[in-house]
Image: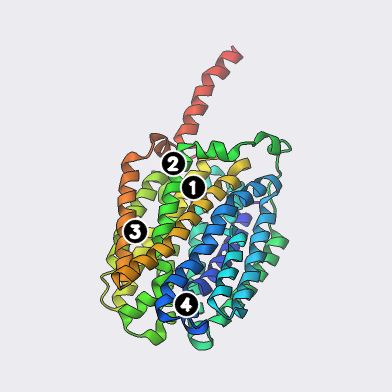
Amino acid sequence: MNWKIALAIMSAAVFMMGGSYTMVIPFLPLFIARDLGAAPENVNLLTGVAFSISFVITFIAAPIWGRLADLYGRKPMFLRSCFTITICYFLFFIVRNPTELILARALQGFGAGMLPIAFSITSAWAPKEKIGIAMGTLQGVHISGTVFGPLFGGLLADSFGVRSAFLIAGFILLFLGVLVTLTVREPKKREDTKNSEKGTYRRLLHDSVILTVLSVTSLTAMAWLMQQPLMALFTSEVSGNAEKAASHAGIIFSVFGLAGAIAAPIWGWCGQRFGFFRMMVTSGIAGAICCAAVAFSSSFSILIAAFFVYGFCFAGIIPSANSILILATRTEIRSSAFSLLFTAQMLGSAIGPVTGGMVATAAGNVSAVFITAGSSLLVFMIIIAFAAPDRVRRISRTNRSGLSEEELRAAQAQEPDKTEQQA
């Protein structure tokens, strides 16, 4: 299968995936408050629980799905995730109280994993010298889907209710499952893969490169998920228009996503040229500063501008981390590696909403959440910039052939041995 065809198909898949997700998830606080009859003083807490329970279950289950993907194929695991989440969206459409919603979100945790498997499928086909471009493109297209999702979902929520967004998102994922079933192929697996890769997770977790990437991914997810569930409430605070909270939040998410869609391929190209670690840290520091600055927006128009800059800066963290992970792992264990990355992301995602809800409740406003998230991420990225192992820097810099510096040195070290054998 040509890598460009694989990239095109998976780009369409992650576009629909991102769009369907952001059509519904950002509006859960409004759904809990308006449709499910939660008491106003409980909305923040229930929102945090509804968000976090899915991530907690995903955190536990993701390594299992990743290992099964390496052993039995990425495509079956992608379809397992796609159709499970489809069922969950339809369940969201019929729930009648917060408890039922939380249970449906718990089931969604077992269905998570589409995005890392999409990255894994694409990386298996893409040549190494195109990894940065492929990962940046895939991330950019996924973010583009998140541009469409909240804008369309917000309009649906304000016009027809949040339930209509759940229903349409379910049909989108149903179509996605059929598309991938009919079009995607996987590279042939070696017959000895099952026996040769015992202890995969143990080896990965002892790798300094992998541990650094996992830490960055987890903290980035925590910082973002501290904000995301409360975005509709924050836009309502800034704009002073509670009736349009859903559509205003949709606009903000779309602006953030648009900036990210523009920036992600640029960050990917820069990473290929200047080093993925350098771009990951640069994007993290810039994004953290912008995150904290968002809290001081005094009007809705300023908030839109602030989120565009924020989205542009923030967009380089994850594609850079993905590219480092790919350079540090072999194709045969890459789904396991991506599942660990996804597990780390889910750990941060589980902590983030509850932490954000607690900060907002203690401070009495949502602005404090952005300051806390941005400050935490900034401190962490500065520490990583100075304390990360030197091997992370070496492996994240590639030459024109797509080999990392570490791989290039290993290849050069083998040359004398070949010369001696020939003599």
Give the residue pinned by disc 1.
Answer: 323
Does residue 359 appear to the left or right of 262 in the view shown?
A: left
Q: Residue at x 62, y 80 (%)?
A: 94
Distance from the alpha carbon under mark 3 to that under mark 4: 22 Å
Q: CA distance from mark 4 to mark 2?
A: 36 Å
Asked if residue 47 is positioned above or below residue 219 in the image, the reply reads: below
Labelled pair 2, 3 in contact (Cβ < 8 Å): no
Label 1 element class = helix
Query: Label 1 neighbourhood size at 10 Å, few (<14), some (14-19), many (20+)?
Result: many
Q: Quadrant of residue 178?
A: bottom right
How far apart are labels 3 and 1 at the CA level? 19 Å
Judging from the image, what secondary structure is the residue with disc 2 in? loop
Looking at the picture, how far across and down is residue 151, in whole percent? 47, 77
Disc 3 vs disc 1: Cβ atoms closer than 8 Å? no
**Image check: 87 left or right of 214?**
right
Instruction: Depth check: give the residue in front, 185 or 286.
Output: 286
**Along the polypeptide, which appears first: circle 1 or circle 2?**
1
Q: Which residue is mark 3?
A: 287
- Distance of mark 2 from mark 3, alpha carbons? 20 Å
Quadrant hosting residue 96: bottom right
Give x and y (percent) for residue 35: 52, 83
Lower sequence index among marks 3 and 4? 4
Single out the mark in the foreground, 3 or 1: 3
Q: Specify which label sits upstream in the sequence, 3 or 1.
A: 3
The disc placed on residue 396 is 2
